[in-house]
Image: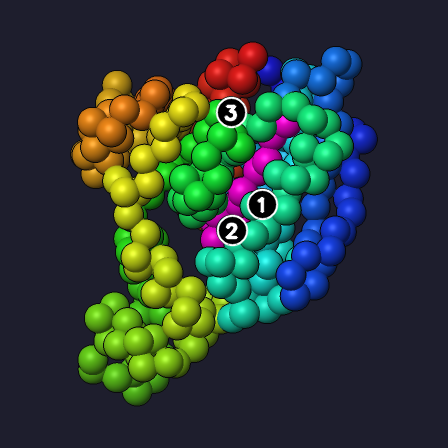
Amino acid sequence: MTRSAAAPGALPFFFPAEAGERFCLYHAPAGTCRGAVLYLHPWGEEMNKSRRMAALQSRALAQLGFGVLQLDLYGCGDSAGDAGDARWEIWLADVAAGAAWLRQRLDQPLTLWGLRLGALLALAYARAAPGVAQRLLLWQPPANGAALLTQFLRLKMAGQLLAEGAAEDNSSATLRRQLAGGATLEIAGYALAPQLAASLDALDAAALAVTGCPVHWLEVTPRGGETLMPASERVAQAWREHGVDLHCHPLGGAQFWATQEISENPALLDTSCAILA
């Protein structure tokens, strides 16, 4: 199926929130509205790599009759604040504000759709506000925030190795000690504050079991296997033991949030549409 990243009728706007305005794109539903979807993006450069897929999926869901809100979190994208000012608590408040905006505009059941760090944010918000979301759509959720933070810190480590006169002690443990000491790190053009780093390090997906609504875990595996990756499967098993209505969807295709060139994953788009339809 031929797709275009352009989203006809997408409405760009800002709404007021804590510490400044948030930039949003709203995709109005085609025909009778069937529900509301709030998209929570990934972190850092993954957000930029994922913009095309987010636009494609938002447009496809709008064509199915869903109102979709793409929200730039505080300190990200075109919203107020610098990256170094971002805090987990502010992001949770942003999710609440986005959900309230959709509820006021559409008054329809809400799906929280999150990619990578956005998936952990969706889980954390759904745990804190039970009953708000009718469904969770999780794209490539990490098993924990510490793994995401380590991946981000490795960009700093790689830069130090390439720099002339790089320090011998170049490890994620060293960088974590600097953060724990109150230092803000500059990594690949993004400032990482110690407060946000501590929040990410403490995130454990296994402890974020959400009951009361279906949870769909979509994961692009290296070989497009029939099961989730081992770390993901351990989280999934913990959720099942806590009574989560979990549906796992292992898929093949491009890991677009990490590819060097902007890429697409049609299987992920089609599966997400089928779930909501």
Whether residue 23 is in magenta: the answer is no
Q: Nearer the viewer, residue 35 or 40?
A: 35
Q: Amino acid at mark 2?
A: Leu
Q: Is residue 166 visible?
A: yes
- Tell me the residue that label 1 is attached to: 96
Quadrant housing the N terminus: top right
Q: Amino acid at mark 1?
A: Ala
Q: Are marks 1 and 2 in contact (CB under 8 Å)?
A: yes
What segment is highlighted magenta in the picture? Answer: 36-49
Q: Residue furthest bottom?
A: 165
- Tell me the residue that label 2 is attached to: 92
Q: Earlier in the sequence, mark 1 or mark 3?
A: 1
Horizontal side of residue 238 vs 123, given as left or right: left
| In this view, 162 is above or below 96 | below
Q: Quadrant of residue 101?
A: top right
Q: Quadrant of residue 65?
A: top right
- C-alpha span from label 1 to label 2: 6 Å
Residue neighbourhood size for the residue with mark 1, other residues' Cα within 10 Å, grouped as few (<14), some (14–19), many (≥20):
some
Query: Which element type, helix, strand or loop, lies under badge 3?
Result: strand
Query: Which element type, helix, strand or loop, lies under badge 2?
Result: helix
Q: Nearer the viewer, residue 220 or 111?
A: 111
- Where is residue 246 shown, x and y percent of the image? 33, 22
Query: Which element type, helix, strand or loop, lies under badge 1?
Result: helix
Q: Nearer the viewer, residue 82 or 167?
A: 82
